[in-house]
Image (spheres, grey):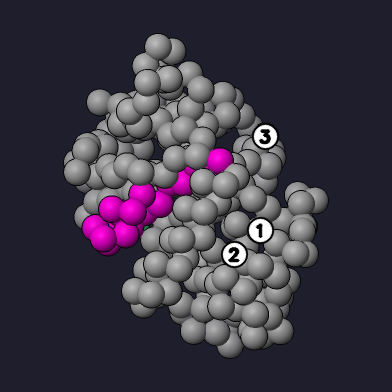
Amino acid sequence: MAIRAESNSTSIRNEGAQSLLRVSRLSKSYPGPQGALPVLRGVDLALDAGTSLALMGESGSGKSTLLHLVAGLDSADDGSIHIDGRETTALDDEGRAALRRRTLGVVFQQFNLVPSLTVGDNLSLQARLVGRHDPAWSDRLAQRLGLEHLLDRYPEQLSGGQQQRVAVGRALAPRPRLLLADEPTGNLDEATGDAVLDLLLELSATAGAAVLMVTHSARLAGRLDRRARLVAGRLVAP
Ligand SMILES: Nc1ncnc2c1ncn2[C@@H]1O[C@H](COP(=O)(O)OP(=O)(O)OP(=O)(O)O)[C@@H](O)[C@H]1O
Ligand SMILES: [Mg+2]
């Protein structure tokens, strides 16, 4: 079953033709002691620009695996991923990296901050790499994320929740068209988590970004446009 937003304008077009992200029959197994262990068994998903989807599911159900495949950081066994109409599964490593830089913002479950760079430099790193560094937007992000007093610190001098907010800011700095966020509020208290989600949804509403966010919180998931759950390797409506 393809999980899609209901919209009058899309129903008369080809299914998913204009979706920013389209995942079809995606499968992925990992090698296990008793042979291949299937994690994703034919995932279908379409996400339009300016819309958000909460990805839910038990621990170990494959949420991070799906995000890694969409980000082009790992390859699927079968199926396809289209981003902005281009099949990423057909690109080589360099092509995928270029697409990732140009179009994607990724917040990993492990924050992957650069330890030798200050908070300020971590925040602007991604945007500088793609020539989209905007000092005013960077300052605003730091302020919205409550990081403005921490810009000269190094990641190891931050709490887990502060590091998480730097990772969110770094992903948002280039104003990505597709944001993949793996439990971006997992280490935050309720009010801070809400503030971070406000920011993600604002980007979606004002810049037309598509947001795919993993969360275990039904309350936060309820604030996104749609929800889907990974069960036994497939996406189902919750
Ligand atoms: N590199 C790997 N090699 C082998 N097995 C892996 C690998 N990465 C993940 N797995 C397995 O794949 C399954 C899905 O893992 P994944 O990290 O995608 O789950 P998740 O839904 O993100 O869980 P969580 O909510 O705990 O973050 C798990 O059973 C995990 O042990
Ligand atoms: Mg995970």
Question: Residue at position x 77%, y 57% from top?
Answer: 133
Which quadrant is the C terminus positioned in?
top left
Residue 77 spot, x, y in % from top left:
40, 32
What is the C-alpha distance between the residues marked 1 and 2? 6 Å
- Residue 229 place in picture, x, y as percent: 24, 44
* Residue 167 horizontal/vertical position (percent): 56, 66
Q: Which of the two discs, 3 and 1, sits closer to the camera? A: 1
The mark found on residue 95 in the picture is 3
Q: Is mark 1 within 8 Å of ligand 2?
A: no
- Residue type at mark 2 is Gly
**Which is more N-terminal, label 1 or label 3?**
3
Magenta span has 222? yes
Q: Is residue 111 left or right of residue 138?
A: left
Q: Are marks 1 and 2 in contact (CB under 8 Å)?
A: yes
Magenta-highlighted residues: 208-224
Q: Quadrant of residue 192?
A: bottom left
Apparent side of residue 144 relative to residue 187 in the rendered image (left or right): right
Most distant residue in the right direction? 131
Read off the residue under disc 2.
169
Tag 1: amino acid: Ala
Residue 104 seen in the current view = no
Three-letter amino acid code of the residue under disc 3: Gly
> Mark 1 = which residue?
173
Q: CA distance from mark 3 to mark 2?
A: 25 Å
In the rendering, at what x and y percent does residue 142 appear?
63, 72
- Between marks 3 and 2 in the image, the one whose residue lies nearer the viewer: 2
Q: Residues within 10 Å of mark 2 (few under 14, many from 20)?
A: many
